[in-house]
Amino acid sequence: MSAGSIPSGDQIKDPGYPTASENYLTNSKGVLSWLFTLDHKRIGVMYLIGVMTAFFAAGLLALLIRLHLFRPDGAVFTGPEANNWYNQVFTLHGAIMVFLFIIPSIPAALGNFLVPVMLGAKDVAFPRLNLSSFYLWIFGAIFFVSALMASGLDTGWTFYTPYSTTTDTSVILATSGAFILGFSSIFTGLNFIVTINTMRPPGMTWFRMPLFLWATYATSIIQVLATPVLGITLLLLIAERVMHIGIFDPEFNGDPVTFQHFFWFYSHPAVYIMILPAFGVISDLISVHSHKRIFGYRFIAYSSIAIALLGFLVWGHHMFTAGMGPMTTIIFSALTFTVSVPSAIKVFNWLATMYKGSISLTTPMCFAIAFIFLFTIGGLTGLHLGTLATDMHLHDTYFVVAHFHYVMVGGTLVSFLGALFHWWPKMFGKMYSEFGGRLSALIIFLGFNLTFLPQFVLGSRGMPRRYATYDPEFQTLHQVSTLGTLLLGVGLLVALVVLIRSLLKGERAPANPWGGATLEWQCTSPPPFYNFDRPPAVGDPYDFSDIFWDTENERYVTVVPERKTVPTEKPEPAHAEGTH
Amino acid sequence: MSTIEAAAENAHDAHGQHHDHDHPSFLAHHFDTPEQQFDSGKLGIWLFLVTEILFFSGMFCAYAIFRMLRPDVFEGCSQFLNTKLGAINTGVLLFSSLTMAWAVRCSQVKQDRGLVGMLAATLSCAMIFLGVKAIEYSHKWEMGLLPAGMFFYDPANPHPESHTNYLFYICLPFMILLGGVVIWLLTSLVTKNRFHIQCAMPLTVAAACFFVGIGLGMVLESGDSEHVSDSHHSEVDHLAGNSPQVTMINSGDTEVLERLAADATNSGAKSELTARQRQFETAGTTIVQEGDDIAGAIVSVEENVMTKRKAGVFFSIYYCMTGVHAIHILVGIGFLVWLLVRAVRKDFNPQYFGPVDYVGLYWHLVDLIWIYLFPLLYLIR
Amino acid sequence: MSAHGDSKDGYDFAHPIPVPMLLAVFGALVVLTIITVAQASFDIGSLDIVVVMVIATIKAALVMAFFMHMAYDKPFNVIVFLSSFAFVALFLIFTMSDSSQTSPDFEPVIEEAATEMASPAVEAPAASE
């Protein structure tokens, strides 16, 4: 592929720029036009604002945790209620991050925007349901905030009985919030499954879909199957608190381990809801920024579905020390190993994609490479925890904390940021400072590792999780971790500043700033409110051979060879005619 | 293609022109054909039903665990659930499924009056079901058969003087509803608004059917209640009468323990012996020690099932399952009313009958769940 | 798009079920309900729950196939719905088997007598020391 030279005579296909009345951001004005919009793109943007706010709030709580842990006796909370305050802080950090940020992040904030556009469709299958999902998210958030304002929540985000049924904090408010958020998640998943099933354009078979859509589809399957079980679990928990139904209470022949079974049957597949969309993003990012066809498309597609299904078989690995029967623990441990295989397949395929590609180290690519590194560490340490024998020692230590932060923050958050930087020009029509973006990626990478790598060591040396104070022997590692948090916070702030500045002062974005081949790059940046006038022609989503860099206009364009309807050369007479 | 640099003038017009005969009013703008719209909605509602199945699965799991661990509790308590009323409710729901499926057929062949009639019949059945449920619930609350934490049933005094008339409070919202619908009917008759009359009449019938259910429940419950408690008492006596056929053959262990306990330094053995003695005294029957050989099998153990910890849990599960099911019926009623109004407005035709079909599927799921709940709760022997 | 499963002549994608079929299915359901209630009065021991579930499943299959149109619907929708039962089974089987392994009878010694006896029992070893 030549850089900067387009063969002359060929036709350039570029949609150009939208007018103000076409641009979905400006085609109708006023707060009400946003609050009652049915446009999936606007809903996606509202979700984006919502989840970023939740992330900021829960991030402040995380900062509070780490500052408190700077000293063995606790540096922030003092007095007789110090430990209670600490319990509330880590509970709300976890609950807000899990339910309000990570689960909706990529599917709702980015998926809502991208799924119809990648399909060349005008909207999702059920636009009003989509808006309801958003409002359910808002209601759930309100419930969490009110739980915070009321007596707080100190059960841990996992709500284990019997503490959650007997503590006098605002468990009911928080679980009601989580229940409502569950419905938001279910409806989003339902919408995506139907959209991808019935609204694909002519020519887009299953295996000509972008991998982001495969990932979204697999995520939606999990959302639809697993979240209702969380719903009933939380409902039964509320009933247990209010009416003492006795199911989880040994006083009444109940069993707290039953609660854990019910809870983790959802919450383990939930972690795959968190990571699968991230995988889908990375597949697209690596391929586009390496300007090379994705390696092993079918393997990646099938592995997404495999992870979704296998993820339902392994929930017991969160309960190895809870008091399950020995046979059960062995079975769950064995099954846990199977679910690591599809994830590994993906990592190999991404690396193979990068090999001999023409890599542009743009901001999204920096985040994608960081993802591969961080997720690999997170995934491998998951195997440490999935092994029954080692988990006996590592369960409920900082090793677990480090593991899930590596996969959720180093995995999903890094991928989310990469996706944000990748599709920001498409969503808002502005380019951002590449220097600023790459700087933020670097600081985030360094800060993150500084925060969580020491925690693996802490955990394996015995530091328990959810403890407000600790033995002085752990102090150095905790302090390193806290410094890392500050650095991570700076990096995230830089990223925020870069993106906000782009909205105010950024250059106008072309339709295809990165050279992608999927359909979303064939409409303007930002897209018109109707996405596409008519369904676009569907090609191979990872075939970059007809995409060229147009140097004068600093954009990628699709080049179509000139169609000659009249031959320019006279054809030679056929030799078989005899007479020469 | 769709921008200013290409054919800008055409873009808008072309987009605008797409909204005419190709796009009837019932076809949403983002779908290309009515069939695509129908298929999407169908898949959507099937996925929603999947979530409902998974939602109920939690309670079925709790049921399964408890029935597996305490089958005697389940047998004892099932006596309190009136099988006749349960069977009637099952029949009523099955009939409502029939009328609902028939309503879907009517919408597909454009039989508008049939559609309204069938929807009204489905609604009426739903209200009858709720009426019977109201009787069952209020009766149990008066007897104290409540979830575990609030359980206060006393076999000696099964029908205590109740200060609160639970039945009245349950009926109150339905009475208000009936009153409201009747007022709507009367005002629409006065104003001669055909549309309102056609909506209000079937809704009045449906609202009144709640009290048909109440009446049905009262007739059958009073006929059976004495019978039920008698049979329960006889069950308890039956349980108490059978003492376990256990004889201890080898109690060598106790002899060894007594010899050890005779030595004052073996305080552990002594307290073990004391504990066993007390256990023997408090237990109404013989104790089986570890390592003993037992000649006979335990036929039944004398114990009172009607305690908070045992029957209470059964009723917790009962109320959770039937309560969540009843909530689903209420939501279904809401959707059926919406459908009825749309049917009176003649919204549906052979190209657009999706909503009726989808609500129908939901309603059949509600029936499906009851098909499983009825034998699992009411027919345990 | 793809053709709808099975559509009747004259309809694009609708498939109205004939009334006699609806009534026949209803009749079968009522008969099965009567059978189910009747079998409850016979004591067949542990087979009881199996029989009851089998009859309930036959009723459910009738409702699903005819009232819910599954017999004439796209195979994909059928697979979607039936697969949910597979996940329910998975959930129930694992949880129940674990419960049966780890839940001995929770019922401790009888309530009031135990609390009275408990305190002297605690004191007795101290006294004998």
Image: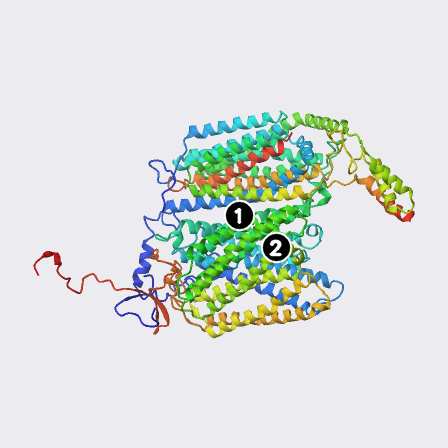
Front residue of A552 and A169: A552
Report the residue at 66% width, 43% height from top. C99
Q: Chain of mark 1?
A: A
Q: Amino acid at mark 1?
A: Leu
Q: Are marks 2 and 1 on the same chain?
A: yes
* Residue C75 appears left or right of A252: left
Q: Between disc 2 and disc 1, whose residue precedes? A: 1
Q: Tell me if I can see residue B369 in this picture.
A: yes
Q: Is residue B79 above or below residue A424?
A: above
Q: Which residue is mark 2?
A: A387
**Quadrant the C terminus of chain B occupies:** top right
Q: Residue furthest left?
A: A579
The answer to which image quadrant residue A245 occupies is: top right
Q: Residues within 10 Å of mark 2 (few under 14, many from 20)?
A: some
Instruction: Indicate the chain on which mark 2 is placed.
Output: A
Identity of the amino acid at label 2? Thr
